[in-house]
Amino acid sequence: MKLNPYQVLSLLLLVSSPYQATAVTSSPTIQQGDSLIQEGLQYLNTNQPQKALKRFQNAESVYEDAQHSNGFNGALINQSIALKRLGQYHRACTVLTEVLTLNREICQRPSNNSLSIPDLDKLGLAPEQQLAALQNLGNNLQLLGQLESSVTVLKRATTLDPSHPDIILSLANSYQSQYKDAINQLSLTADPTSEATAINTAQEKALEAISLYTSLDSIPSHRVHAQLNNLQLIQHLKTVKSSNLSPVYQQSQHLIQPYISNLASTDFSQFHEVDAVNLELKLSGLLNEQGMTREAFHHARSALDRAKLLQDSSLRSQAFGTLGKIYLESEQLGDAKKVFSKALKLAQSSNDDSLAYQWSWQLAQIYQQSGQRTHAIAAYNTTISHLDQVRTMLISASSDLQFSYKNSVEPVYQEYIKLLLSSPTPSYQLVLDTHQQLQVAELENYLKCGKLLAQSSEQLASYSATIHILDLNGQIEIIAQTPEGIYRHQPDSTIVQQELFKLLTLFDGDSVEEISEAHFLRNAQILYSELIAPLSDHLPPTGDLLFVLDSKFQNLPLSLLHDGQGYLIQNYSVTNSLNTYLQTRKPKSLKSLNVLFAGLSQESPSFNSPDVPKGLPALPEVDEELREVKQISQRFTSLVNRDFTADRLKAAIYQETPIIHIASHGQFSSDPQKTFLLAYNEPINAQQFHDLINQKSELGQATLELLILSACETAKGDRRSALGITGLAIQAGSKNTLASLWLAESRATTELITAFYQGLKEGRSKAQALQQAQLKLLASKDYWHPYFWGNFILVGS
């Protein structure tokens, strides 16, 4: 498995020779190192990066033995260039952090603090090595998706040489990646404040990138690269529907025709062979987008001829794939199928999954459009197989390697599922397996945490039925698994979406408790009739239901659905599971209550953190919740107010504690940066929470059985905010998470939580304990309204 390094069309490869002393003063050992460097550079220039890497590594050892620091650092920098050519961006990045004495963690995740770069002069780096190390580190950070760090590094490089065209081009590329990242975030989030932030970021970064690209128009050595990237950005701006971004396109569209004229007449033979192929293929793609089919075809054929001379399978695959897209644009499906088939074989022969997935997907769509159903299914299978190998890299990398989840990952699975369901006798198990792969991909994209491992479904707890609610780009499908079989129902998708929107709008209000029950029931009964009622003949009258929900439905408290006689919770316990494949083994009994309780009853410094919503009230009821939980628990540890810090929570987790209960403000959002829990001194985001909890498994302790978040709420106006609950649960490694969708009246919450713990103590399952706690409030005189008990959902198995 590998990512295709030749897809990175927007970057110049800076091959910088290390500092070398003159022949008069050089020792034979140093001259040996210099000779190895020159051999390595020759291998790079003839497209043999693996051999080049070996020469640079040998040179590193020679220079180290000779204690020649400049030669040693130069060898490392050149190793990073060879590694990048091989597509090994993380290794390239870590090598450069060694040169610059930086923490290698910047290659893996965004820095929590501003990146501090040491005084380079004190490191003994020659000036050209300083520039080479910074530019290549900035480029690799960009490819790894660490965009803020990339910009920081490249800006530092501009302080060494403000007008260096290589640095300006790289910085412009990183700005364009930040623009693309903002647009991608805009397509994923449903949080209004996150949407506004994304649009503003996209506008700002697009303007900065265009300005830098344009500044290189007068520099012959960089004009082609800059104009191609600028043209790509401007054409992308045209496709984005935003009143804020339209002016950016309008003020830059005058560049399109001059750029096309200049680029179309460029002699690409002036560039290094690999660079020439990539540049001409990029031009071909942009011309095809402009409807200039003949010109696009000419440059694609020219690039293909160059690629054949290089005998590089990945380059030829990319060239054939580019030709295929041109044929598709011209509606020549037969020719498109031929060249995509060639492109796929070449990609597979070089184990290039990132290209193979694209060309196989194109073939699947062609087969489906041509009515060749069997071939289409086979092609989709192949596509998903290749996509599974590179999915997490595609959605975490940047620049031309970044495949938008919404545009390039989600549609593959949805198209395949629709094709499977269109069969007169669909394989429902295959549909569910594919759908759950899609949900895993969505979580991986949300968390940016690498590949999530699936568990065997045979280890799951048993349920009366598992009900899957699928949203296939607006087409709603219901599939229920029971001991007797699998059943499918197709509700009226328009009605479901309308009623879902109305009900979630009610929950988003500031005075949910003032809405009449009758008002709730109108929407809840319609949703029940569409989602649950058609399955009633296949469900027992009472029991335990597991719902596997697409993110659009995760904000819906299913316990509130109403059949006209009573709420769903009056007959069934309800558990929400985003994906049964991610559940761990069968949960243990929690009769012996061992609880770590952390909470804030007073206003704290974290309330004033920049990303925390303003005006959060103190939670004095947390003290009462603490007393009730302590009284019912067998073992109890508490961290309250000043004692509740990330460090103290980390220390407390060292104990064998199966239940962690956090009674503090928190927010769940479809934007992971806005998902947090408030400790006394600072917010704890999902990644930090993962780092805190993960030490349990590192210490060989039992997995967290239950995480309770009793004072959190979903972000207002964010219809996918409950994805944050699942994301936090996955990060915590918790088998189950009990969380609130909105803040209810404090005494009601304390009663519900106390009743829930009592149910656990009596040996009930977590789902049954929650059901009984909610029914207790429903039957009460004061808390019967859904506002008081409908806010809690249980996520897990």
Image (tube, helix red, strand yellow):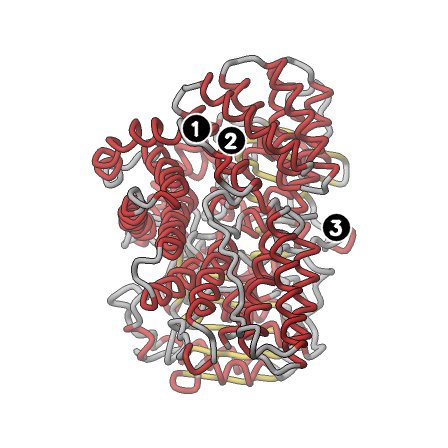
Q: How many marks?
A: 3
Callout 1: SS:
helix
Label 2 sits on what residue type? Glu
Pointers 2 and 1 in contact (C-beta within 8 Å): yes
Which quadrant would residue 352 be assigned to in this image? Answer: top right
Label 3 sits on what residue type? Ser
Q: Is residue 736 left or right of residue 236?
A: right
- Mark 2 neighbour density, 10 Å: few (under 14) some (14–19) many (20 or more): some
Query: Label 3 belongs to which residue?
Result: 457
Residue drawn at 65 percent across, 65 percent down: 35
Callout 2: SS:
helix
Residue drawn at 49 percent across, 32 percent down: 280
Label 1 sits on what residue type? Ile
Q: Earlier in the sequence, mark 2 or mark 1?
A: 1
Query: Label 2 belongs to which residue?
Result: 530
Query: Label 1 belongs to which residue?
Result: 495
The relative height of residue 321 versus residue 444 in the rendered view (above or below) is above
